[in-house]
Image (spheres, helix red, strand yellow):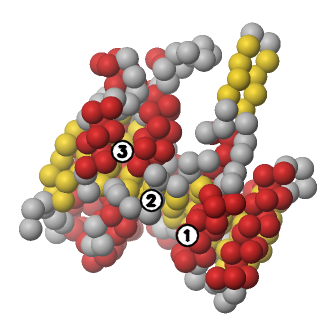
């Protein structure tokens, strides 16, 4: 068989460092071909746009896309006409039809004490955030003048139906659907459509509805309560970052963005950390775990995905700690620790 073709998008900040770590680990479990492309701020510098048409075409023809991180203060601007790295990410999700973002949150026993929450609260937590990714306020019409701004939040029933099905299929026992139906019309539609899909197609899965503010409190007060959290684009973004603190660091949280067909996009949840870029101290584990999700959801290589995740767990149990986890291990040392466990 020809090697699986992966478009790699190093992006900005620590992106090139952590992506190099992930590809080293991937090469230890399989045969893959890589096509590296500039993305985000790096693409703005090179081409004047965060995402070129050539990169879109390459991603569409690949078997999977592995992204590191984008953004940084160099490209921050309040000018609505200035290109921003994050615009490339939104456009790529839309171009690939990636409407479902999966963010598993499973604190590793070796890191229970790294979380700001008490061990007895997070012990045994194993939840999945299913975030709608191509609709809502991030993609609605935007207007801006010198003293006025607006962002339109809109959803259609079919958009809600397809992400609800993703959540119900992933659930072991319960889906907690998040909205703000007490004040938002989109929240009321969201709740109605999710309830309808549940009743018609997934009656054996428990469904509960929670307002987003209540869910945010419960996520830190009783995280074991959650199985699958279903949320729109903005609420899912915020809640999954909050949930990352259960693991002790954003540097531990991977994600997979999937559609109905074509390649998926796999990336760590954290940002580009420009303050530590080039110093060799970035935590590569979220990117390595994102590569494991790529093996599972992109290539149906479950054994290889499980082996990679187990290697990360064993490395942490053996004492591996990068700076964000309270230790001093470098990016290279963290990578070597995982490779040693794989061997």
Closer mark to the observer between disc 1 and disc 3: 1
The residue carrying mark 3 is 67
Label 1 close to label 2 by CB (< 8 Å): yes
Q: Nearer the viewer, residue 7 or 251?
A: 7
Marks 1/2: CA–CA distance: 10 Å
Q: Which residue is rendered at x = 83% and y = 59% of the image? A: 188
Q: Which residue is rendered at x = 67% and y = 46% of the image? A: 136
Q: Which residue is rendered at x = 54% and y = 19% of the image? A: 76
- Checking the image for residue 232, the label placed there is none
Q: Would you identify the image quadrant in which residue 37 lies?
A: top left
Query: In terms of secondary structure, where does tag 2 sit?
Result: strand
Q: Nearer the viewer, residue 331 or 102?
A: 102
**Quadrant position of the N terminus in the picture:** bottom left
Query: In terms of secondary structure, where does tag 3 sit?
Result: strand
Q: Nearer the viewer, residue 196 or 16?
A: 196
117 vs 223: above or below: above
285 vs 17: above or below: below
- Checking the image for residue 258, the label placed there is 2
Of label 1 and label 3, which has the lower sequence position? 3
Give the residue at the far right of this rendering: 182
Relative placement, left or right, of 75 versus 288 is right
Whether residue 320 appears in this view of the structure is no
Relative placement, left or right, of 72 versus 297 is right
Of label 1 and label 2, which has the lower sequence position? 1
The residue carrying mark 1 is 166
* Percent of width and height locating residue 173: 64, 84
Q: Residues within 10 Å of mark 1 (few under 14, many from 20)?
A: many
């Amino acid at each position: 068989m020809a090697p699986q073709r992966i478009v790699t998008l190093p992006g900005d900040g620590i992106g090139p460092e952590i992506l190099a770590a992930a590809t080293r680990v991937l090469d230890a479990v399989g045969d893959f071909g890589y096509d590296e492309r500039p993305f985000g701020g790096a693409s703005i510098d090179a081409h004047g746009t965060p995402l070129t048409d050539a990169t879109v075409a390459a991603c569409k023809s690949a078997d999977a896309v592995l992204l590191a991180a984008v953004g940084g203060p160099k490209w921050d601007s309040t000018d609505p006409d200035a290109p921003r790295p994050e615009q490339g990410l939104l456009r790529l999700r839309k171009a690939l039809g990636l409407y479902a973002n999966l963010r598993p949150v499973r604190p590793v026993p070796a890191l229970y004490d790294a979380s700001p929450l008490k061990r007895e609260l997070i012990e045994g937590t194993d939840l999945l955030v299913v975030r709608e990714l191509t609709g809502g306020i991030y993609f609605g019409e935007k207007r801006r003048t010198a003293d006025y701004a607006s962002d339109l939040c809109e959803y259609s029933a079919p958009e809600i139906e397809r992400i609800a099905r993703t959540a119900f299929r992933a659930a072991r026992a319960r889906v907690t659907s998040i909205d703000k139906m007490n004040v938002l019309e989109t929240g009321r539609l969201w709740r109605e459509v999710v309830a309808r899909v549940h009743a018609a197609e997934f009656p054996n899965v428990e469904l509960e509805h929670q307002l987003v503010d209540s869910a945010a409190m419960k996520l830190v007060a009783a995280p074991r309560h959650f199985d699958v959290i279903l949320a729109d684009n903005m609420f899912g973004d915020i809640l999954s970052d909050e949930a990352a603190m259960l693991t002790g660091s954003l540097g531990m949280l991977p994600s997979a963005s999937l559609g109905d067909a074509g390649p998926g996009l796999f990336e760590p949840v954290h940002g580009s950390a420009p303050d530590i870029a080039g110093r060799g101290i970035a935590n590569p584990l979220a990117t390595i775990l994102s590569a494991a999700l790529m093996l599972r959801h992109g290539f149906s290589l479950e054994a290889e995905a499980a082996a990679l995740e187990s290697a990360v767990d064993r490395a942490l149990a053996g004492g591996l700690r990068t700076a964000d986890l309270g230790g001093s291990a470098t990016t290279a040392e963290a990578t070597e620790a995982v490779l040693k466990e794989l061997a």
